[in-house]
Image (cartoon, rainbow, N blue to C red):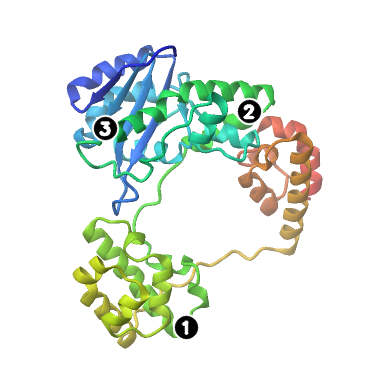
């Protein structure tokens, strides 16, 4: 970890065996992924920063095929070789989906910081707290699919893994000292299982804030706009929310819209009006004149009174116990474990997700009482 590790740009299949050899010899790997979710309809893994042993490799998956990355799979899937990540849910999901590189042996330093009860758990905040180094934030919204990369963006990407092993090692020491290692390992296993929701959901408009407050005769307009936005976003390869945000969807649905002037008044972007304004007005007209059939709203499970009482008892106890121990709520009882106990009780604690043997030993009797 002493000195500045050399940085190697990797964008050819011929370079991957060298990277794989470095991974095979390294006791740990530090990983980060840059994606273009702020700029594309379907985000992609655009950059893989890999710190392996004494060198940093910046891999360009846009220039490579999935099969080209196959030499990395053994080291990435080796559970005995620690993988340092920070806030790794997206990284894990995109590496699996786009690169066929599942990860095992993850230690997520953001999960560790959260379990320790730290309020600021972003990578920059954690690096500054542990190492006294302030990282640049100028490229947080950069389009990582651009080539060639801006030199400053490349430096920014490298910084995301340069300090990650030291941060991870120190946080691991802190969770061990706080007797939170098993809890952290359980949280990191959940990170390893992360996936991304795929595909368009015709009924997704029901989740738009304000949808259920619309008059019934305006809901078909919202449903039509929801589908129109997705179609145009796919055509333009832009995130749907960059075309029309959810507030605009509701505003367009709430009142009859007939003219460009009304669209402009609501704040529709000029470039979108220029290219798709007539199409948007036609969509609104069709929704008024021939309302599309509505997908049924999501059916929320009815919560029984005894479940509500269990949840209240569990939350009250968790709050008090976290305060007593000086740890986070998740360290005492993860949200998924609480939800399971609320619904099913504590008859089989071994089956409760993300609970673990240590929490069962510490709190088993108490949980059985609270969740009866």
Q: Which residue is mark 3?
A: 151
Q: Is residue 371 depicted above or below 131 in this figure?
A: below
Front in this rendered view, residue 311 or 326: 326
For label 2, the SS is helix
> How many angstroms separate mark 3 from mark 2 (CA)?
40 Å
Q: Is residue 319 depicted above or below 82 in this figure?
A: below
Nearer the N terminus, badge 1 or badge 3? 3
Q: Nearer the viewer, mark 3 or mark 2?
A: 3
Q: Position of residue 275 (x, y in %)?
A: 19, 68
Question: As drawn, is 82 to the left or to the right of 263?
Answer: right
Nearer the N terminus, badge 1 or badge 2? 2
- Quadrant for residue 352, please give it: top right
Q: Which residue is mark 1?
A: 216
Nearer the N terminus, badge 3 or badge 2? 3
Question: As drawn, is 100 to the left or to the right of 314?
Answer: left
Label number found at residue 132: none
Question: As drawn, is 109 to the left or to the right of 63?
Answer: right
Q: Position of residue 259 (x, y in %)?
A: 27, 84
Residue at 75% of width from left, 46% of height from top?
A: 319
Q: Is residue 323 depicted above or below 204 in this figure?
A: above
Q: Which residue is mark 2?
A: 182
Residue at 63% of width from left, 35% of height from top?
A: 115
Q: Position of residue 229 (x, y in %)?
A: 31, 67
């Amino acid at each position: 970890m002493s000195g500045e590790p050399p940085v190697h740009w990797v964008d050819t299949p011929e370079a991957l065996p060298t990277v794989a050899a470095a991974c095979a010899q390294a006791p740990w790997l530090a990983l980060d992924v840059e994606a273009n979710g702020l700029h594309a309809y379907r985000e992609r893994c655009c950059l893989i920063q890999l710190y392996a042993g004494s060198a940093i490799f910046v891999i360009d998956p846009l220039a490579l095929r999935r099969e080209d990355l196959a030499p990395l799979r053994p080291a990435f899937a080796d559970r005995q070789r620690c993988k340092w990540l920070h806030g790794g849910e997206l990284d894990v999901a995109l590496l699996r989906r786009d690169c066929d590189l599942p990860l095992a042996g993850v230690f997520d330093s953001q999960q560790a910081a959260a379990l320790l009860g730290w309020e600021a758990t972003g990578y920059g905040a954690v690096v500054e707290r542990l190492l006294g180094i302030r990282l640049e934030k100028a490229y947080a919204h950069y389009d990582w699919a651009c080539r060639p990369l801006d030199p400053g963006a490349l430096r920014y990407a490298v910084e995301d893994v340069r300090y990650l092993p030291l941060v991870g090692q120190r946080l691991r020491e802190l969770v061990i000292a706080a007797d939170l290692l098993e809890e952290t390992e359980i949280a990191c296993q959940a990170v390893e299982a992360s996936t991304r929701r795929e595909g368009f959901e015709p009924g997704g408009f029901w989740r738009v804030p304000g949808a259920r407050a619309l008059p019934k005769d305006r809901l078909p307009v919202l449903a039509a706009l929801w589908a129109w936005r997705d179609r145009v976003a796919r055509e333009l390869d832009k995130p749907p929310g960059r075309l029309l945000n959810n507030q605009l969807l509701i505003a367009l649905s709430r009142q009859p819209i007939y003219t460009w002037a009304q669209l402009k008044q609501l704040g529709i972007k000029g470039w979108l009006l220029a290219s798709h304004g007539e199409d948007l007005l036609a969509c609104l007209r069709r929704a008024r004149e021939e309302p599309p059939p509505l997908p049924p709203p999501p059916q929320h499970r009815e919560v029984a009174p005894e479940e509500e009482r269990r949840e209240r008892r569990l939350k009250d106890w968790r709050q008090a116990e976290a305060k007593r121990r000086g740890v986070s709520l998740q360290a005492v009882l993860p949200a998924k474990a609480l939800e399971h106990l609320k619904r099913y009780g504590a008859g089989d604690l071994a089956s409760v997700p993300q609970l673990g043997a240590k929490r069962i030993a510490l709190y088993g009797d108490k949980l059985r009482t609270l969740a009866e």
